[in-house]
Structures are given as structure tokens and as C-alpha cells.
């Protein structure tokens, strides 16, 4: 291995661990644990998502990401289709209970972690084209989803805190 490739491999290993260790899911589950409906529905600022909406977004995003990585691995030159998360929030009834979305998020993450553990170096080099962002490879996917849940767990904590302040 050349010296220049070591940071990329180390970054990939770290980011893979972030998904495989399931801590992102655990942080989200802890962030919503014991939340009242008022806390789940509070918006930290106008136009910002509530904790409830964030949980549904995470479920939809993780399920979408699970399909994306599978398509990247199994389909040559796959087109990765973008989606409008705001449209999802409006049309997919993000006002519903969160239990099923938490379970879907957890399952998508766990099954993807099992897959990541088995990828070869050739698998990691596979690419497709994202309809909004162009070239989209395995490392692009990993860079996005390795921090996604943790970032949203912080948003959930802020949204719940806004209910207690206001």
C-alpha cells in the first residue's frame, strides 16, 4: 500500500465502523427516548424539522441509502436517483408515530453493516452516476451516511430542547 492511500483506507475503515457499530442508530434512539408528543413535534426554529420529522427522514434516507449501495455493488454504471426530502416530508405523512420508522432505520443500517463487512476492494471501487451530483462511488456513499445519523441525533436533541424552552 502506498503512503498516499493510507489516509483514504483509514478514513474508510473509520466511516465503515461508524455504520457497522450501529452507534448512529443508538444515538438517535437515545435522543428520542422518553419524548413527549410536544417534544417530538416542537420546531427549534421556523422552517426547521421537528424530532418526529427527523426520525421519519432518517428511516427514508437509510432505506434509500441501503438500496443505493446495493445498486452500486450489483449494477454496472448504475444511475443513483436523487429525491426531494422536503417533498418526502410533506407527502409521506411525517406526522405519524415514530416506532416503525425507528425500526426501519435500525434494520436498514444493520443489514447494510453486514454487507459492508463483506466488500472486496473491487466492490469499493464501483461507481455510478447520481442524477443531481454526478459521479457517485462507494466512498461518496460512505462519507455521507457514516455521519448522517449522528448529525440528526444532534438536531433531535435541539428540537426537543426547544419544546422545553418555549
Image: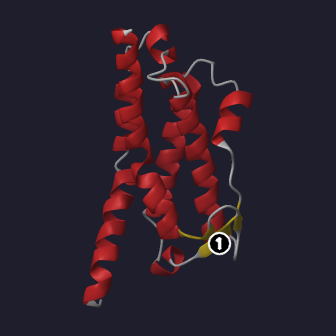
Q: Measuring 36% from the left and 67% from the top, which residue is drawn there?
A: 12
- Tell me the crowding category of disc 1: few under 14, some 14 to 19, or many 20 or more residues within 10 angstroms, Cα based: many
Q: Which quarter of the figure is the C terminus placed in?
A: top left
Q: Report how many numbered discs are placed on residues in the image.
A: 1
Residue furthest to the bottom in view is 2
Up/down of 80 relative to 27, above or below:
below
User: Which residue corresponds to the image point at 37% horizontal and 42% vertical from the top-left?
Assistant: 150
Task: Estimate the x, y position of residue 55 in percent, counting from the top left.
Answer: 52, 30
Instruction: Please tell me whether residue 6 is drawn above or below residue 25 in the rendered image.
Output: below
Q: Secondary structure at mark 1?
A: strand
In the image, 48 versus 10, the foreground residue is: 48
Q: Outermost residue toward the front?
A: 46
Is 131 on the left-hand or right-hand side of 59?
A: right
Query: Which quadrant is home to the N terminus?
Result: bottom left
Question: Residue 154: percent from the left, percent from the top?
Answer: 36, 34
Q: Provide residue 16's location: percent of width, then percent of height.
A: 38, 60
* Quarter where residue 131 is shown: bottom right
Residue at coordinates 63% horizontally, 49% vertically from top-left?
A: 64
Give left or right: position of 50 versus 160.
right
Residue at (47% x, 69% y) in the render:
139
Q: Nearer the viewer, residue 79 or 122?
A: 79
The residue identified by callout 1 is: 128
Name the colour scheme. Answer: secondary structure
Rendering coords of residue 118 (x, y %): 46, 67
* Of residues 87 and 136, the one drawn nearer to the viewer in this rendering: 87
* Residue furthest left in the image: 3
Amino acid at each position: 500500500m502506498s503512503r498516499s492511500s493510507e489516509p483514504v483506507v483509514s478514513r474508510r475503515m473509520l466511516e465503515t465502523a461508524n455504520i457497522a457499530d450501529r452507534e448512529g442508530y443508538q444515538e438517535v434512539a437515545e435522543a428520542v427516548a422518553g419524548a413527549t408528543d410536544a417534544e417530538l413535534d416542537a420546531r427549534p426554529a421556523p422552517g426547521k424539522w421537528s424530532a418526529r420529522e427527523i426520525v421519519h427522514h432518517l428511516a427514508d434516507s437509510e432505506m434509500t441509502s441501503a438500496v443505493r449501495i446495493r445498486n452500486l455493488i450489483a449494477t454496472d454504471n448504475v444511475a443513483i436517483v436523487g429525491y426531494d426530502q422536503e417533498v418526502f416530508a410533506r407527502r409521506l405523512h411525517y406526522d405519524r408515530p415514530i416506532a416503525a420508522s425507528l425500526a426501519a432505520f435500525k434494520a436498514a443500517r444493520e443489514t447494510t453493516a453486514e454487507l459492508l463487512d463483506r466488500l472486496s476492494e473491487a466492490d469499493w471501487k464501483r461507481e455510478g452516476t447520481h442524477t443531481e451530483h454526478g459521479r457517485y462511488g462507494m466512498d461518496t456513499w460512505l462519507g455521507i451516511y457514516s455521519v448522517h445519523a449522528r448529525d440528526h441525533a444532534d438536531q433531535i436533541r435541539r428540537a426537543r430542547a426547544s419544546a422545553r424552552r418555549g
